[in-house]
Image (cartoon, helix red, strand yellow):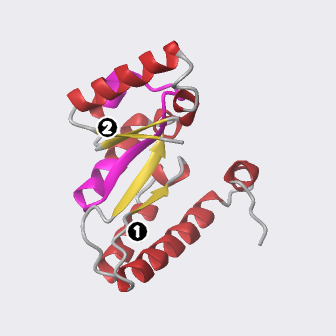
Amino acid sequence: KCEIPPDSFISIAEKTGQMDALTRWVTQEAIAQYLRWQRAELHIKIAINISAENLKDKSYSNFIIALKERYDLTDHAITLEVTEDAVVADPEKATEILSYLRDHGFKLSIDDYGTGYSSLAQLKQLPVQELKIDRSFVQYLMASQDDQTIVKSTIELAHNMGLSVVAEG
C-alpha cells in the first residue's frame, strides 16, 4: 500500500483544475465509509476538507446536500472544514456558501486556524461552530511558552464566541 501525503498532490490538483473533482470523489468516499461504520454500529462522525474552489459557487454545496438527503444522514454527521485562506479569497461569497451549508445541517470548522490571513472581524462573521488550531502551535506546546500563550488565547477566544476547539496533532 502506497500512501501519499495530501501536501504532495493538492497543489497539483489545484494547478490542473482538478480540485473540484478530487473534492467530490473524496466526499463520496468519505460518506461511503461513514455508512459502513454506521452499519457496523461504529458511531464515528467524519470531517471533509473543502477547497477554496468549492466556496465559489453552490454546485458543490448542492452536490453534498443531495448526498446527505439521498443517504438520510443526520445533521452534524459530517463536518465540513475550510481553511482561513479559502475564506480570504472571497469572504462574502464564502460566508454565503457556508451559511447555506450550515442551514442544511452541516457542522462547519475553520481548519489550520492561526496560519492564514483572516482577521478577527472575519472570524466573527463566519457561520462556523468549530476552530481547529493548527498543529504548528500544538506540536511544541510543552516546550514553547509562546505556543502555550497562543493556544490558550485561541481556546478562550473560541469558547467566548461559542465555538468548540480541536487541537490538531
Q: Secondary structure at mark 2?
A: loop
Amino acid at dot 1: Ile
Residue 77 picture location, percent across and down:
31, 65
The correct choice, above or below, for 114 with respect to 11 in the image is above
Give yes or no for residue 66 being in the magenta stretch: no
Query: Which residue corresponds to mark 1?
Result: 64
Residue 76 picture location, percent across and down:
28, 61
Residue 17 picture location, percent across and down:
69, 57
Quadrant of the rendering where the C terminus is positioned: top right
Occupied quadrant, residue 155? top left
The correct choice, above or below, for 168 with respect to 146 in the image is below
Query: Measuring 62% from the left and 64% from the top, which residue is drawn there?
Result: 22
Q: Is residue 17 left or right of residue 94?
A: right
Q: Earlier in the sequence, mark 1 or mark 2?
A: 1
Q: Secondary structure at mark 1?
A: helix
Query: Measuring 40% from the left and 68% from the top, which residue is drawn there?
Result: 64
Query: Measuring 21% from the left and 35% from the top, which residue is drawn there?
Result: 162
Range shown magenta = 98-123
Query: Which residue corresponds to mark 2?
Result: 126
Amino acid at dot 2: Leu
Q: Is residue 23 left or right of residue 72?
A: right
